Amino acid sequence: MIIFQTVFCGVAQSGQGYDMREINRLVFVSESDTGKGPMAAGAMGLCALARKYEIVSRGLVVLLPEPINEKAEAVMISNGIQIKDYKSNALTEEDFTDDTMVIAVERQQYESMLSKYDHASSVYLLEELIGRPVNYEDLRGKELSDYGKCFEQMMSDMRELAAFLNDREKERREEK
C-alpha cells in the first residue's frame, strides 16, 4: 500500500539546464489541492521510476487547509493509495527551489504560476512533458464514477510521464 505524502519515487528530466542529481522533489500543482493534484501525485507514486524523489501536491488557491475531496479519496484508496489525515497545502515561493520540479496538472495552473510567482523556476506543464493535450473533466458536483474515470486517465498520463522521465534518466546515466 502507498501512503501519500511519504511516497518516494524516481524522476529524471533533461533540458533547461537541470542536472537531475540535484532534483529531489516533484510538486504536482492543481487549483485547490483537494482533488486532481493529490490524485496526480498519488498516481505518480504508483509508477515504476528510475530514481527516488519525494512526490507531493500543492494548490494555487488554499486559504485554509482542507481535507481531500471524499470522492477523490475513495478512488485513491480503491487504487491502493492511502491518504491518512491529508490536508491541502498552498503553493508558496519556497516550493520553487533548484531541487524541485513543479508540474502543473492543467494549463490554467501553469499560466497562473508563471504570472503569480516571481521566482517560478523549473515549472512544467504536464501535457508538454508527455507530448499531447491533457483534458481532465471539471469534477465539481460529479459522481464517484467520474472521479474514477479521471483517475484512470491520470494514471495513464502518469505512466507516460514516468516513461519520459525514465528515458531522460537513462540518457543522463549514459552521459556519465
Image (cartoon, helix red, strand yellow):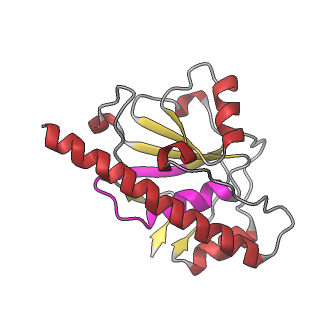
Q: Is residue 36 above or below residue 94?
A: below
Q: Residue furthest front?
A: 132
Location of residue 108 in the rendering, given as x and y in whole percent from the top left corner: 72, 40
Q: Residue 44, can we see it?
A: no
Q: Is residue 75 above or below residue 17?
A: below
Image location (x, y in percent) of residue 24: 37, 42
Residue 40 included in the magenta stretch of the image: yes
**Which residue is at a point 71% across and 71% down the rendered structure image?**
147
**Going 64% across and 75% down the picture, which residue do you hit?**
75
Q: Nearer the viewer, residue 114 or 88?
A: 114
Rendered image quadrant of residue 72: bottom right
Residue 50 percent location from the top left of the image: 28, 56
Left or right? Give the position of 35 relative to 96. right
Q: Residue placed at 46% from the left, 29% from the top? A: 97
**Which residue lies most toward the left here?**
176
Total of numbered circles in the picture?
Answer: 0
Magenta stretch, residue numbers:
36-56
Spot the residue most to the top. 118
Residue 87 versus residue 96 in the image, above or below? below
Residue 4 image offset from top left, x and y in percent = 52, 62
